Amino acid sequence: MKRGLFIAPFDELVDPRVMAGVAAAAEARGWDGLFVWDHVLYRAPVRAVADPWIVLSAVACATQTMRLGPLVTPPARRRIQKLARETVTLDHLSDGRLILGVGLGSDNSGELGPFGEELDPRKRAKLFDDGLERLAAMWGGEFEPAPVQQPRIPVWAAARWPNRRPVRRAVRWDGLFPIELPGPDALAELVAETTEARGGEPFDIVAEIEPGDDPGPWERAGATWVLTGFGRQPRLAEVRETVAAGP
């Protein structure tokens, strides 16, 4: 099992230089990855929001070994050709350390409706599936350069518990990031389902815990990654304290 940090680049963590410093310190303490929220707007009390791709570029330049990526990017509100260029460029900048987290997205943060994005979840699901297929084709040779990682950049798909349709979608890719899980037993259910669906092929299952929580029960349930998250208003002091404590 690997351990990572899951940080919203908001408010106190909005400066990419601060996030780069956090990442460098985390790598030195043995953390395996750093993942950031991807939003263009977020509801109150959040005020300041950073672009995740700029933040991740700063993190890539400040580190050498840790994995990194957005959790999660909604393809339905992205131009896929732009996402293809961003992901491949970041994969090269990081020497093949990018993991792309994707999801349907929602308007709970108020970032879809005000910008004319698709609000119907069924239509977003179609845009999601079509977008990922186009993205894989662009990674696979339609665009140059190709990603460092082959056959492609790993993709983790999000799913809100207990919905199973997103889980079935995720097993076509490389990992599952379930959110709002009631506990490790629910994660164990998903591990069993995805293991059967994948025929035992390698597949990541990602769990999120709060600072100070014991990752052990999640590891025993089958998580391959456990991320320590800090909510929508991360405090720099708490993040630094967690980093210093080690994974």
Image: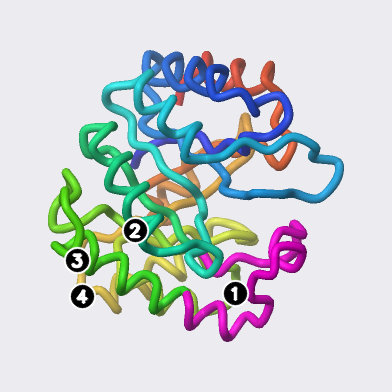
Q: Is residue 129 above or below residue 150?
A: below
At label 1, the amino acid type is Pro
Q: Dividing the picture into quarters, in which one does residue 230 lie? A: top right
Measured in 3D between alpha carbons, the distance from the residue under mark 3 to the one under mark 1, in whole angstroms, is: 23 Å
Q: Nearer the viewer, mark 3 or mark 2?
A: 2
Disc 4 designates what residue?
Answer: 199
Disc 3 designates what residue?
Answer: 201
Residue 72: percent from the left, percent from the top? 51, 54
Local secondary structure at mark 3: loop
Q: Is residue 181 above or below residue 26?
A: below
Q: Are marks 3 and 4 in contact (CB under 8 Å)?
A: yes
Q: Dividing the picture into quarters, in which one does residue 116 lie? A: bottom right
The residue carrying pointer 2 sits among few (fewer than 14), some (14 to 19) or many (20 or more) residues within 10 Å by Cα, namely many
The residue carrying pointer 3 sits among few (fewer than 14), some (14 to 19) or many (20 or more) residues within 10 Å by Cα, namely few
Disc 2 designates what residue?
Answer: 155
The residue carrying pointer 4 sits among few (fewer than 14), some (14 to 19) or many (20 or more) residues within 10 Å by Cα, namely few
The residue carrying pointer 1 sits among few (fewer than 14), some (14 to 19) or many (20 or more) residues within 10 Å by Cα, namely some
At label 4, the amino acid type is Gly
Dot placed on the residue nearer the N-terminal end, 4 or 2: 2
The residue closer to the viewer here, 168 or 197, is 168
Q: Are marks 3 and 1 in contact (CB under 8 Å)?
A: no
Read off the magenta span: 103-127
Local secondary structure at mark 2: strand
Q: Is residue 98 above or below residue 62?
A: below
Disc 1 designates what residue?
Answer: 162
